[in-house]
Image (spheres, helix red, strand yellow):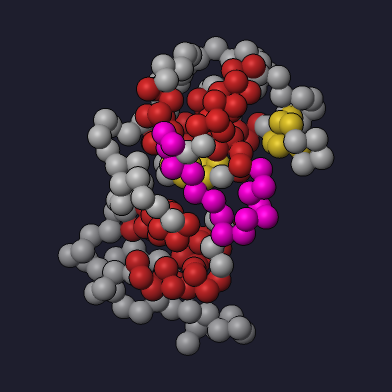
Amino acid sequence: MTDNANSALQRPKWKKWTQMKFVELWQAVALSCDIEPRAIHLDPNFGIFRTRTRFMGDADFYERLDIALADGGTGFELVEPEDDDEVADRRKCRVRLGAFGAWAVSLEWRPFPEEFPCDEPGEPQGWPWGKYSTKALGYIAAAVWKFYRNHNPKRPNDNVPDNADVEAFLVDIGASAHMAEAITAIIRPDAAKRGRRQRKGGDSP
């Protein structure tokens, strides 16, 4: 555990965050400072971070955020949502948490929480395509990680999500409805039965 400069901020719920493959850049920086991202928010009116009651004044947080923004995604992959209007503020770009952790460790940030997930040396930063990535590949990686990372090819119909659930997840992280539908079909196991899609009235076909 690290010592927060702002003792009023709670520690991250690491059991949850270590299971999240992608987070927003500012969230990754908050986690690197041992701060629970849900305890702070970006004030859209002033462009600053606040707690529920006051300005968030952790100096390490702002210094690390400046360094991460200056890096520009060179040491870790930045994934922007499809709607560019939503990322006029690059602090909201998504990053792969393990790649960000490995990058932060390479900079010898101290203090640094031991719970922060870090890729092993030599592990591709843009799973599984190396450093090359596009928005669509980022969405594919996020969906595969969430829904199929524990899939057993020998039991293709076990724990396979409905297409509607996968599409909803993809739309939530920035994909268009059309792209979400295409990606859902692409990543669905070849041997699995067709996913059930709900009709407008709510009944399954």
- Relative placement, left or right, of 90 versus 15 is right
Q: Nearer the viewer, residue 13 or 82?
A: 82
Magenta stretch, main secondary structure class: loop
Q: Is residue 9 above or below residue 149?
A: above
Q: Report the residue that reaches farthest toward the left.
A: 154
Q: Residue at x 67, y 47 (%)?
A: 88
Can see residue 143? no
> Does the segment drawn in magenta span residue 83?
yes
Q: Quadrant of residue 11?
A: top right
The magenta stretch spans which residues?
74-89
- Relative placement, left or right, of 128 versus 82 is left
Q: Is residue 172 above or below residue 91?
A: below
Q: Residue at x 29, y 69 (%)?
A: 189
- Relative placement, left or right, of 160 versus 96 is left
Can see residue 42? yes
How many numbered callouts?
0
Q: Residue at x 56, y 33 (%)?
A: 69
> Which x, y percent locates residue 170?
51, 61
